[in-house]
Image (cartoon, rainbow, N blue to C red):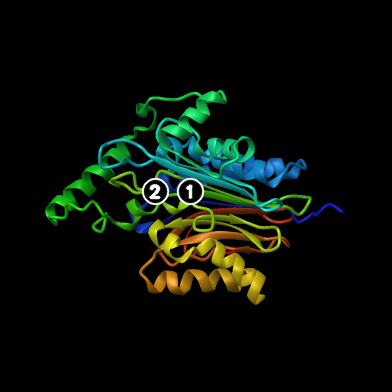
Amino acid sequence: MANRNFTLVIHGGAGAILKSKMTPELEQQYRDGLQQALAAGFDILKKGGIAVDAVQRAINIMEDSPLFNAGKGAVFTHEGKHEQDACIMDGRTLECGSVAGIRRIKRPINLARLVMDKSPHVLLGGEGAETFAVEHGFELVDDDYFHTERRRQQLQVAIEKEAAKDDPSGDNQFLSEDTRHGTVGAVALDRDGNLAAATSSGGMTNKRFGRIGDSALIGAGTYANNKTCAVSTTGHGEYFMRTVLAYDLSALMEYSGLSLRDAADKVVNGTFTELGGTGGLIALDAEGNIAMPFNCEGMYRGWQSHDKGPTVAIYKDDNSE
């Protein structure tokens, strides 16, 4: 029997998102961008489409926007380039596809989907991933496609702070949270009761040495399993990797019997926070229950179900689910 609790939840990054530092015009642009992504993804679910298509489509909208740190709006590396990660997972089959450190793909999540559908592997990186893309008809774009003045200014500030602190390690410890944290993600439940999750990210401003974040790693930044939940994280990726946070949430539900919300709160406010991690996640279970905990000032987020929404929120005191 078809499941009528079809639902879509999205995020566009988390961090030091303060209303006092947001102009009304920019805030409206973010709200509009989230609404557009929700509408595109939810339309697929409403028409009986599958969850993996819905999350991919929602992320495409955010990847095409200069507002979000993925695709067009990706941040700069220390060398003034762009290196992006993405991952998608089907909760019905546990099939997944990831790409890491890719430089010339407009919509990284589409290449992750191709890896899932057309490759025997789970994770492809760098030039090899782009060769695979070209062999399947993807167009490569020049790095200039990703250039935005806002991101260039963020890079310059990060480099200046690094120099002032005499820190040549490039570990980003002097970056503010809004330049550390940037990812887009989506989780969905379709009419057939199947879950899916996807995440796409430009990584950290001023990153070096081919750094790869949690967004490319199954179980850290992305996870989906029909038995439990679908999860996409956003925040300081190293801590999501160290705690394997997305899978930990699923494991708490499967092996300890915790509810989605209790498991989500536990993983965000437990070891992740104790270690110094900041950020949040979106999660969805097979009954259509939603969790969106975060331990920082804000998280760009939105949700819609068969009988609720669409709703978007940015700050802690915005509408809750």
Question: Residue 296 is drawn in which quadrant?
Answer: bottom left
Residue type for callout 1 = Ala
* Residue toward you, 191 or 37: 191
Question: Within 10 Å of the Cα at label 1, are there few (<14), some (14-19), or many (20+) other Cα atoms?
Answer: many
**In the rendered structure, are the residues bearing label 2 and label 1 in contact, judged by CB atoms less than 8 Å apart?**
yes
- Residue 142 point in image, percent of width and height: 38, 25
Asked whether, in this view, residue 190 is left or right of residue 224, the answer is right
Question: Residue 78 is drawn in which quadrant?
Answer: top left
Question: Within 10 Å of the Cα at label 2, are there few (<14), some (14-19), or many (20+) other Cα atoms?
Answer: many
Q: Residue at x 50, y 55 (%)?
A: 221
Q: Quadrant of the N terminus?
A: bottom right
Q: Residue at x 53, y 49 (%)?
A: 185
Q: Residue at x 51, y 30 (%)?
A: 132
* Residue toward you, 127 or 280: 127
**Disc number placed over residue 216 in the picture, else none:** 1
* Residue toward you, 239 or 37: 239
- Residue 193 point in image, percent of width and height: 76, 54
Residue type for callout 2 = Ile
Residue positioned most to the right: 1
Res. 248 in view = yes
Question: SS for tag 2?
Answer: loop
Tag 2 residue: 212
